Image (spheres, rainbow, N blue to C red):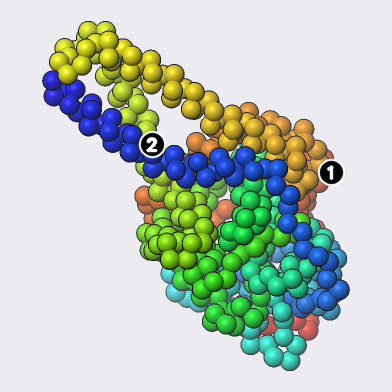
């Protein structure tokens, strides 16, 4: 019968899809199973390098004062050896004024081109400015977002890595508002997975790190040797990492340096962030990552395979839509054949009966195993081991997300796949907190200056 032939063809396609998904998934399973590896520690250095923190900011008056103030006042690092540069990008609010009041060196960036209204261009502008400083040059640049906070020894740990020969590094990605609600808890667990599992395994096996934006350290030597911040796409941080990997600069992981990020606290903001990740990741997968994958065969460096497998998940999130569609069809068609509702000629009804229960048992077992490993066990381990890096006062405040985490992974895959298949517009996201969660587990309140104080503190700050 024609419908039996169709079923065989679709079954073969399904096997191919499962294999394509299983290959990168196996790498993620291996990463999780290597949780016991010790973290990399760099020796404490008596030599201290000069650091330039650079923060691109567009209309960030709600958070910029606290961010700058926190970096300047709370870093356990000689104050004369670091500066904070804020690039006020096409701002129409008090971002520049408040940044100066907090102690930042403010650079004004005006660019009327709508296509340039993204973090890439003010970041390039700021790094170019810093690279041209000759009278007292910096040794490294650290990129922060306008809402980021750092643990107090962040600069010390990054300097230790730099003095050990590291020219490109990422920190541990923690959260400022982990305990706020379902979305912030889930996003916190998700990003902590990449730090605690993925980044640690890569560091121990000498695989290049995925250095993604917030808290990224770039040596001045590397920046000058490679022409500055040479990205051109909306996924500028990933593109920059790929550029450096292609040139032989491997990113490293400084695990004890923690950058606290403001996690999205609503479905709308979660969707917007994930859609941008999917869109940018798909563009880079097609334009760069497939090409870089070929370098594995000429260099033998597994870093190229890791990048391909990791960012290949963007494509797989799209491909994964095949699975629910196919198995809905499968669980309708096969019972009809197994129980005599459709005439069969290719195989006996008993074949379809056995196929039905084989599929139920195998598929159910695989789904349960994945949910347990990547959902419950992974989330529980992270909550128990790294809750402090998530800025939570105690583990109890994060436990509710453990059981619900598999649902977030499904949401993440769906929203990333939407972004991969579309061109999402940049949307302004809500700012939820101005500092790591307070002792009671809720987001802390900002304490920016009043207008008079801001005006008075602005004197003497650089502007370009």
* Residue 222 tag number: none
**Count of numbered labels shown in the rendering:** 2
Q: Badge 1 is on which residue?
A: 439
Q: Tag 1, which secondary structure?
A: loop
Residue 439: x and y in percent read 84, 43
Q: Nearer the viewer, residue 216 or 453?
A: 216
The disc, 1 or 2, on the residue closer to the chain's N-terminal end is 2
Q: Badge 2 is on which residue?
A: 18
Residue 83, by quadrant, is: bottom right
> Which residue is painted at 73% across and 57% down in the image?
40
Quadrant that contains the C terminus? bottom right
Using residue 33 as the reference point, say whether residue 18 is left or right of it.
Answer: left
The nearer-to-camera label among 1 and 2 is 2
Residue 432: x and y in percent read 67, 49
Disc 2 residue crowd, few under 14, some 14–19, many 20+, Cα 10 Å: some
> Which residue is painted at 48% across and 55% down in the image?
305
Q: Nearer the viewer, residue 121 or 174?
A: 174
Q: Nearer the viewer, residue 106 or 189?
A: 189
Residue 443 visible? The answer is no
Residue 369: x and y in percent read 54, 28
Using residue 115 as the reference point, say whether residue 208 is left or right of it.
Answer: right
């Amino acid at each position: 019968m024609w419908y039996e032939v169709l079923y065989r063809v679709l079954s073969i396609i399904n096997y191919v899809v499962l294999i394509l998904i299983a290959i990168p998934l196996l790498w993620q399973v291996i990463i999780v199973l290597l949780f016991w590896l010790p973290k990399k520690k760099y020796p404490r250095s008596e030599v201290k390098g000069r650091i330039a923190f650079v923060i691109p900011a567009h209309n960030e008056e709600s958070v910029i004062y606290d961010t700058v103030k926190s970096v300047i006042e709370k870093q356990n690092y000689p104050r004369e050896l670091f500066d904070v540069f804020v690039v006020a990008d096409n701002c129409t609010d008090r971002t520049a004024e408040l940044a100066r009041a907090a102690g930042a060196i403010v650079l004004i960036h005006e660019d009327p081109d709508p296509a340039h209204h993204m973090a890439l261009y003010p970041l390039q502008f700021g790094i170019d400015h810093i690279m041209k400083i000759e009278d007292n040059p910096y040794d490294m640049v650290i990129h922060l977002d306008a809402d980021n906070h750092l643990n107090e020894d962040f600069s010390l740990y990054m300097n230790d890595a730099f003095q050990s020969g590291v020219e490109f590094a990422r920190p541990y990605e923690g959260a400022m508002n982990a305990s706020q609600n379902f979305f912030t808890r889930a996003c916190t667990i998700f990003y902590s997975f990449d730090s605690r599992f993925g980044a640690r395994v890569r560091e121990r096996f000498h695989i290049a790190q995925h250095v993604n934006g917030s808290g990224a350290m770039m040596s001045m030597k590397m920046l000058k040797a490679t022409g500055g911040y040479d990205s051109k796409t909306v996924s500028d941080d990933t593109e920059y990492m790929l550029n450096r990997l292609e040139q032989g600069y491997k990113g490293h992981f400084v695990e004890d340096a923690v950058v606290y990020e403001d996690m999205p606290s609503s479905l709308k903001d979660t969707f917007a962030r994930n859609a941008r990740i999917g869109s940018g990741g798909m563009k880079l997968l097609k334009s760069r990552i497939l090409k870089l994958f070929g370098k594995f065969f000429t260099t033998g460096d597994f870093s190229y395979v890791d990048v391909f497998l990791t960012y290949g998940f963007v494509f797989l999130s799209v491909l994964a839509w095949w699975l629910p569609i196919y198995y809905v069809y499968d669980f309708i068609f096969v019972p009809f054949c197994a129980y005599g509702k459709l005439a069969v000629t290719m195989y006996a009804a008993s074949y379809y009966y056995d196929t039905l229960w084989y599929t139920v048992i195998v598929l159910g077992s695989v789904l349960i195993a994945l949910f347990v490993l990547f959902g419950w066990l992974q989330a529980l381990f992270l909550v128990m081991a790294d809750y402090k890096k998530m800025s939570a006062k105690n583990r109890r405040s994060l436990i509710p997300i453990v059981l619900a985490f598999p649902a977030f992974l499904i949401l993440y895959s769906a929203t990333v796949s939407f972004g991969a298949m579309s061109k999402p517009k940049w949307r302004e996201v809500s700012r939820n907190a101005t500092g790591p969660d307070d002792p009671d587990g809720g987001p802390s309140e900002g304490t920016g200056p009043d207008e008079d104080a801001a005006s008075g503190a602005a004197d003497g700050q650089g502007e370009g």
